[in-house]
Amino acid sequence: MAGAIVFERTGGPDVLQWADVRVGEPGAGQVRVRHEAVGLNFADTYFRTGLYPAPLPSGMGVEASGVIEEVGADVTDFAPGDRVTYTGSPLGAYSTERVMPTDSLIHLPDAITAETAAAMTMRGLTAAYLIRRIAPGLGAGDTVLLQAAAGGVGLIVCQWARLLGINVIGVVSTPEKGEIALAHGATEVLVGRDNVAQRVRDLTDGKGVPVVFDSVGAATFESSLDAVARRGLLVCFGTASGPIPHIDAMQLAIKGSIYVTRPALADYIADPAERAELAGELFQHVAAGDVRIEVGQRFPLRDAARAHEALESGTSIGSSVLTV
Protein backbone atom coordinates (compact mmCIF):
# COMPACT_ATOMS: atom_id res chain seq x y z
CA MET A 1 0.00 0.00 0.00
CA ALA A 2 1.04 3.59 -0.61
CA GLY A 3 -0.20 6.97 0.58
CA ALA A 4 -1.68 9.25 -2.05
CA ILE A 5 -3.74 12.37 -2.59
CA VAL A 6 -7.00 11.63 -4.43
CA PHE A 7 -10.14 13.54 -5.35
CA GLU A 8 -13.62 12.15 -6.00
CA ARG A 9 -15.21 15.37 -7.25
CA THR A 10 -13.97 18.60 -8.75
CA GLY A 11 -13.87 21.82 -6.78
CA GLY A 12 -11.68 23.78 -4.40
CA PRO A 13 -8.58 22.58 -2.57
CA ASP A 14 -10.76 20.86 0.03
CA VAL A 15 -11.63 18.08 -2.46
CA LEU A 16 -8.06 16.76 -2.15
CA GLN A 17 -7.96 13.91 0.35
CA TRP A 18 -5.25 11.60 1.73
CA ALA A 19 -5.89 7.90 1.14
CA ASP A 20 -4.20 4.51 1.26
CA VAL A 21 -3.98 3.06 -2.26
CA ARG A 22 -2.86 -0.29 -3.61
CA VAL A 23 0.23 0.00 -5.80
CA GLY A 24 0.39 -3.44 -7.41
CA GLU A 25 3.18 -5.01 -9.43
CA PRO A 26 4.65 -3.42 -12.56
CA GLY A 27 3.53 -5.00 -15.80
CA ALA A 28 5.26 -5.14 -19.16
CA GLY A 29 6.99 -1.84 -19.90
CA GLN A 30 6.31 -0.54 -16.39
CA VAL A 31 8.28 0.17 -13.22
CA ARG A 32 7.45 0.83 -9.58
CA VAL A 33 8.90 4.14 -8.41
CA ARG A 34 9.38 5.19 -4.79
CA HIS A 35 8.98 8.94 -4.74
CA GLU A 36 11.40 11.21 -2.88
CA ALA A 37 9.86 14.54 -3.94
CA VAL A 38 6.77 15.60 -5.89
CA GLY A 39 6.41 18.62 -8.15
CA LEU A 40 3.59 21.11 -7.63
CA ASN A 41 2.38 22.84 -10.78
CA PHE A 42 -0.38 25.35 -11.44
CA ALA A 43 -1.77 23.00 -14.07
CA ASP A 44 -2.60 20.59 -11.21
CA THR A 45 -5.34 23.01 -10.18
CA TYR A 46 -6.92 22.71 -13.63
CA PHE A 47 -7.51 18.98 -13.06
CA ARG A 48 -8.81 19.64 -9.55
CA THR A 49 -11.34 22.23 -10.72
CA GLY A 50 -12.39 20.28 -13.82
CA LEU A 51 -10.94 22.73 -16.37
CA TYR A 52 -8.91 19.75 -17.55
CA PRO A 53 -11.24 16.73 -17.44
CA ALA A 54 -10.14 13.58 -15.61
CA PRO A 55 -12.04 10.38 -14.83
CA LEU A 56 -13.17 10.35 -11.20
CA PRO A 57 -12.11 9.29 -8.67
CA SER A 58 -8.57 10.21 -9.60
CA GLY A 59 -5.08 10.73 -8.33
CA MET A 60 -3.37 14.10 -8.67
CA GLY A 61 -0.12 15.41 -10.12
CA VAL A 62 2.09 14.64 -13.11
CA GLU A 63 5.63 15.31 -11.86
CA ALA A 64 7.90 13.63 -9.35
CA SER A 65 11.35 12.16 -8.80
CA GLY A 66 12.55 9.10 -6.98
CA VAL A 67 14.13 5.68 -7.19
CA ILE A 68 13.01 2.63 -9.16
CA GLU A 69 12.18 -0.23 -6.81
CA GLU A 70 11.00 -2.87 -9.28
CA VAL A 71 10.77 -3.31 -13.05
CA GLY A 72 8.31 -5.27 -15.12
CA ALA A 73 8.83 -7.43 -18.18
CA ASP A 74 10.43 -5.98 -21.30
CA VAL A 75 12.03 -3.06 -19.42
CA THR A 76 15.61 -2.71 -20.67
CA ASP A 77 16.52 0.96 -20.21
CA PHE A 78 15.86 1.12 -16.46
CA ALA A 79 16.81 -1.03 -13.48
CA PRO A 80 16.10 -1.16 -9.74
CA GLY A 81 18.09 1.55 -7.97
CA ASP A 82 18.04 3.97 -10.90
CA ARG A 83 17.28 7.57 -9.98
CA VAL A 84 14.60 9.04 -12.24
CA THR A 85 12.42 12.07 -12.74
CA TYR A 86 9.36 12.56 -14.90
CA THR A 87 6.65 14.93 -16.01
CA GLY A 88 3.56 14.60 -18.15
CA SER A 89 2.72 11.18 -16.77
CA PRO A 90 -0.78 9.88 -16.07
CA LEU A 91 -2.23 11.55 -12.97
CA GLY A 92 -1.02 10.08 -9.70
CA ALA A 93 2.31 11.74 -8.84
CA TYR A 94 0.98 12.98 -5.48
CA SER A 95 1.86 9.65 -3.87
CA THR A 96 4.61 7.90 -1.94
CA GLU A 97 5.08 5.36 -4.72
CA ARG A 98 3.37 4.22 -7.90
CA VAL A 99 3.54 1.97 -10.92
CA MET A 100 3.94 3.79 -14.19
CA PRO A 101 5.10 3.26 -17.80
CA THR A 102 8.71 3.97 -18.66
CA ASP A 103 7.76 6.28 -21.54
CA SER A 104 7.85 9.39 -19.32
CA LEU A 105 10.93 8.54 -17.27
CA ILE A 106 14.18 10.47 -17.51
CA HIS A 107 17.42 9.27 -15.93
CA LEU A 108 18.48 11.70 -13.21
CA PRO A 109 22.18 12.59 -12.90
CA ASP A 110 23.81 12.21 -9.49
CA ALA A 111 24.63 15.94 -9.48
CA ILE A 112 20.94 16.86 -9.18
CA THR A 113 18.93 16.16 -6.02
CA ALA A 114 15.47 14.65 -6.06
CA GLU A 115 13.97 17.87 -4.70
CA THR A 116 15.63 19.96 -7.40
CA ALA A 117 14.40 17.54 -10.05
CA ALA A 118 10.82 17.63 -8.77
CA ALA A 119 10.95 21.42 -8.70
CA MET A 120 12.32 21.80 -12.21
CA THR A 121 11.50 18.94 -14.57
CA MET A 122 8.29 20.41 -15.96
CA ARG A 123 9.37 24.03 -15.52
CA GLY A 124 12.87 23.43 -16.84
CA LEU A 125 11.72 21.50 -19.89
CA THR A 126 9.14 24.23 -20.52
CA ALA A 127 11.86 26.87 -20.39
CA ALA A 128 14.00 24.69 -22.65
CA TYR A 129 11.43 24.34 -25.40
CA LEU A 130 10.41 28.00 -25.17
CA ILE A 131 13.95 29.19 -25.76
CA ARG A 132 15.41 26.36 -27.84
CA ARG A 133 12.43 25.27 -29.95
CA ILE A 134 9.69 27.93 -30.05
CA ALA A 135 12.06 30.83 -30.70
CA PRO A 136 15.41 29.29 -31.68
CA GLY A 137 16.38 32.40 -33.63
CA LEU A 138 16.66 34.52 -30.50
CA GLY A 139 20.23 35.48 -29.71
CA ALA A 140 22.58 37.97 -28.11
CA GLY A 141 21.15 41.48 -28.07
CA ASP A 142 17.52 40.47 -28.65
CA THR A 143 14.88 41.51 -26.10
CA VAL A 144 11.83 39.54 -24.97
CA LEU A 145 8.92 40.26 -22.64
CA LEU A 146 8.27 37.66 -19.94
CA GLN A 147 5.05 37.68 -17.93
CA ALA A 148 5.25 36.20 -14.41
CA ALA A 149 9.03 36.58 -14.44
CA ALA A 150 9.42 35.54 -10.78
CA GLY A 151 7.51 32.28 -11.18
CA GLY A 152 9.04 28.82 -11.47
CA VAL A 153 9.33 28.90 -15.26
CA GLY A 154 10.07 32.62 -15.31
CA LEU A 155 13.17 32.40 -13.13
CA ILE A 156 14.60 29.62 -15.30
CA VAL A 157 13.86 31.52 -18.51
CA CYS A 158 15.55 34.63 -17.08
CA GLN A 159 18.73 32.70 -16.32
CA TRP A 160 18.80 30.73 -19.57
CA ALA A 161 18.21 33.90 -21.58
CA ARG A 162 21.10 35.59 -19.78
CA LEU A 163 23.38 32.71 -20.82
CA LEU A 164 22.45 33.43 -24.44
CA GLY A 165 22.80 37.21 -24.10
CA ILE A 166 19.05 37.78 -24.50
CA ASN A 167 17.56 40.74 -22.63
CA VAL A 168 14.45 40.01 -20.57
CA ILE A 169 11.84 42.58 -19.61
CA GLY A 170 10.04 40.82 -16.80
CA VAL A 171 6.56 41.61 -15.50
CA VAL A 172 6.02 40.93 -11.79
CA SER A 173 3.32 41.71 -9.24
CA THR A 174 5.43 43.19 -6.44
CA PRO A 175 8.74 45.05 -6.03
CA GLU A 176 10.05 42.10 -4.02
CA LYS A 177 9.42 39.75 -6.92
CA GLY A 178 11.06 42.29 -9.19
CA GLU A 179 14.26 42.11 -7.15
CA ILE A 180 14.21 38.33 -7.40
CA ALA A 181 13.73 38.44 -11.19
CA LEU A 182 16.63 40.89 -11.55
CA ALA A 183 18.83 38.69 -9.40
CA HIS A 184 18.12 35.81 -11.76
CA GLY A 185 19.01 37.62 -14.96
CA ALA A 186 16.13 39.88 -15.95
CA THR A 187 17.37 43.10 -17.56
CA GLU A 188 14.37 45.24 -16.63
CA VAL A 189 11.29 44.63 -14.49
CA LEU A 190 7.84 46.13 -14.73
CA VAL A 191 5.86 45.99 -11.49
CA GLY A 192 2.12 45.59 -12.02
CA ARG A 193 0.06 44.97 -15.15
CA ASP A 194 -0.94 48.58 -15.90
CA ASN A 195 0.25 50.02 -19.22
CA VAL A 196 2.66 47.13 -19.82
CA ALA A 197 2.61 47.46 -23.61
CA GLN A 198 3.37 51.19 -23.51
CA ARG A 199 6.15 50.70 -20.97
CA VAL A 200 7.66 48.00 -23.16
CA ARG A 201 7.57 50.27 -26.20
CA ASP A 202 9.16 53.06 -24.14
CA LEU A 203 12.04 50.68 -23.42
CA THR A 204 12.39 49.58 -27.05
CA ASP A 205 12.23 52.90 -28.93
CA GLY A 206 8.59 52.26 -29.79
CA LYS A 207 9.24 48.98 -31.60
CA GLY A 208 8.00 46.41 -29.11
CA VAL A 209 9.69 43.04 -28.67
CA PRO A 210 10.07 40.20 -31.17
CA VAL A 211 8.80 37.57 -28.69
CA VAL A 212 6.47 37.69 -25.68
CA PHE A 213 6.27 34.69 -23.34
CA ASP A 214 2.96 34.74 -21.44
CA SER A 215 1.90 32.10 -18.91
CA VAL A 216 -0.80 34.23 -17.27
CA GLY A 217 -3.48 34.07 -19.96
CA ALA A 218 -6.72 36.03 -19.87
CA ALA A 219 -5.56 38.92 -17.69
CA THR A 220 -2.46 39.71 -19.76
CA PHE A 221 -3.31 38.60 -23.29
CA GLU A 222 -4.20 42.02 -24.68
CA SER A 223 -1.21 43.80 -23.18
CA SER A 224 1.10 41.03 -24.33
CA LEU A 225 -0.31 41.24 -27.85
CA ASP A 226 0.15 45.01 -27.93
CA ALA A 227 3.79 44.65 -26.84
CA VAL A 228 4.76 42.46 -29.80
CA ALA A 229 6.82 44.06 -32.55
CA ARG A 230 5.85 43.90 -36.22
CA ARG A 231 5.94 40.28 -37.43
CA GLY A 232 6.73 39.17 -33.87
CA LEU A 233 5.49 36.20 -31.90
CA LEU A 234 3.21 35.91 -28.85
CA VAL A 235 3.71 32.61 -27.03
CA CYS A 236 0.74 31.85 -24.74
CA PHE A 237 2.02 28.86 -22.78
CA GLY A 238 -0.18 29.07 -19.67
CA THR A 239 -3.54 30.23 -18.37
CA ALA A 240 -3.01 31.03 -14.70
CA SER A 241 -5.68 33.77 -14.82
CA GLY A 242 -7.99 31.91 -17.19
CA PRO A 243 -8.03 30.85 -20.86
CA ILE A 244 -6.95 33.36 -23.49
CA PRO A 245 -9.83 35.00 -25.39
CA HIS A 246 -10.80 34.03 -28.90
CA ILE A 247 -8.38 35.51 -31.40
CA ASP A 248 -9.54 37.91 -34.10
CA ALA A 249 -7.26 37.05 -37.02
CA MET A 250 -7.76 40.47 -38.60
CA GLN A 251 -6.42 42.13 -35.45
CA LEU A 252 -3.22 40.16 -35.85
CA ALA A 253 -2.79 41.77 -39.25
CA ILE A 254 -3.71 45.24 -38.01
CA LYS A 255 -1.24 45.00 -35.11
CA GLY A 256 1.66 44.14 -37.40
CA SER A 257 1.21 40.67 -38.94
CA ILE A 258 1.70 39.06 -35.52
CA TYR A 259 2.00 35.33 -34.91
CA VAL A 260 0.33 33.69 -31.90
CA THR A 261 0.93 30.16 -30.65
CA ARG A 262 -0.50 28.18 -27.74
CA PRO A 263 2.03 25.35 -27.30
CA ALA A 264 1.99 22.38 -24.92
CA LEU A 265 5.06 20.81 -23.38
CA ALA A 266 3.82 17.32 -24.27
CA ASP A 267 4.32 17.99 -27.96
CA TYR A 268 7.94 18.99 -27.42
CA ILE A 269 8.95 15.97 -25.34
CA ALA A 270 6.86 13.28 -27.06
CA ASP A 271 9.88 12.16 -29.06
CA PRO A 272 12.30 10.35 -26.70
CA ALA A 273 15.37 11.68 -28.48
CA GLU A 274 14.18 15.28 -28.31
CA ARG A 275 13.15 14.87 -24.67
CA ALA A 276 16.59 13.51 -23.83
CA GLU A 277 18.29 16.36 -25.69
CA LEU A 278 16.29 19.06 -23.92
CA ALA A 279 16.67 17.37 -20.53
CA GLY A 280 20.39 16.92 -21.08
CA GLU A 281 20.89 20.60 -21.82
CA LEU A 282 18.79 21.57 -18.81
CA PHE A 283 20.63 19.22 -16.45
CA GLN A 284 23.99 20.45 -17.74
CA HIS A 285 23.13 24.09 -16.97
CA VAL A 286 21.78 23.21 -13.51
CA ALA A 287 24.70 20.94 -12.60
CA ALA A 288 27.14 23.67 -13.65
CA GLY A 289 25.35 26.23 -11.50
CA ASP A 290 24.49 28.42 -14.49
CA VAL A 291 20.78 27.92 -13.81
CA ARG A 292 19.70 27.87 -10.17
CA ILE A 293 16.42 26.25 -9.22
CA GLU A 294 14.68 28.18 -6.47
CA VAL A 295 12.41 26.10 -4.23
CA GLY A 296 10.35 28.83 -2.66
CA GLN A 297 7.76 26.68 -0.90
CA ARG A 298 7.77 23.19 0.59
CA PHE A 299 4.69 21.35 1.84
CA PRO A 300 4.28 17.82 3.23
CA LEU A 301 2.52 15.60 0.71
CA ARG A 302 -0.42 15.20 3.10
CA ASP A 303 -0.91 19.00 3.00
CA ALA A 304 -1.57 19.17 -0.74
CA ALA A 305 -4.79 21.13 -0.17
CA ARG A 306 -2.87 23.86 1.66
CA ALA A 307 -0.27 23.82 -1.11
CA HIS A 308 -2.99 24.42 -3.71
CA GLU A 309 -4.34 27.33 -1.68
CA ALA A 310 -0.90 28.93 -1.64
CA LEU A 311 -0.41 28.27 -5.35
CA GLU A 312 -3.69 29.94 -6.29
CA SER A 313 -3.08 32.92 -4.00
CA GLY A 314 -0.36 34.21 -6.32
CA THR A 315 2.06 34.73 -3.45
CA SER A 316 4.44 31.88 -4.25
CA ILE A 317 7.92 32.57 -5.60
CA GLY A 318 9.90 30.17 -7.73
CA SER A 319 9.00 26.49 -7.60
CA SER A 320 6.99 24.57 -5.01
CA VAL A 321 7.46 20.95 -3.99
CA LEU A 322 5.65 18.36 -1.91
CA THR A 323 7.95 16.47 0.43
CA VAL A 324 7.48 12.73 0.84
Image (cartoon, rainbow, N blue to C red):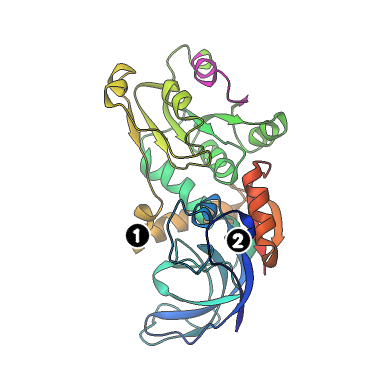
For the point 50% across and 69% down, the residue is: 57
Residue 131 spot, x, y in % from top left: 43, 41
- Image position of 146 (left or right of 16): left
- Image position of 232 (left or right of 63): left
Element marked by disc 2:
helix
- Above-or-below relation of 305 to 78: above
- Above-or-below relation of 176 to 253: below
For the point 68% across and 49% down, the residue is: 310
- Above-or-below relation of 268 to 62: above
Q: Which part of the image, by quadrant, shows the C terminus?
A: bottom right
Element marked by disc 1:
loop
Residue at mark 2: 15
Q: Is residue 238 visible?
A: yes
For the point 44% across and 19% down, the residue is: 208
Residue 176 spot, x, y in % from top left: 72, 33
Magenta region includes residue 197 = yes
Q: Nearer the viewer, residue 249 or 9?
A: 9
Picture quadrant of residue 300: bottom right
Q: Nearer the viewer, residue 236 or 17?
A: 17
Picture quadrant of residue 171: top right
Residue at mark 1: 270
Query: Magenta residues, as a range?
Result: 190-201
Magenta region includes residue 16 = no
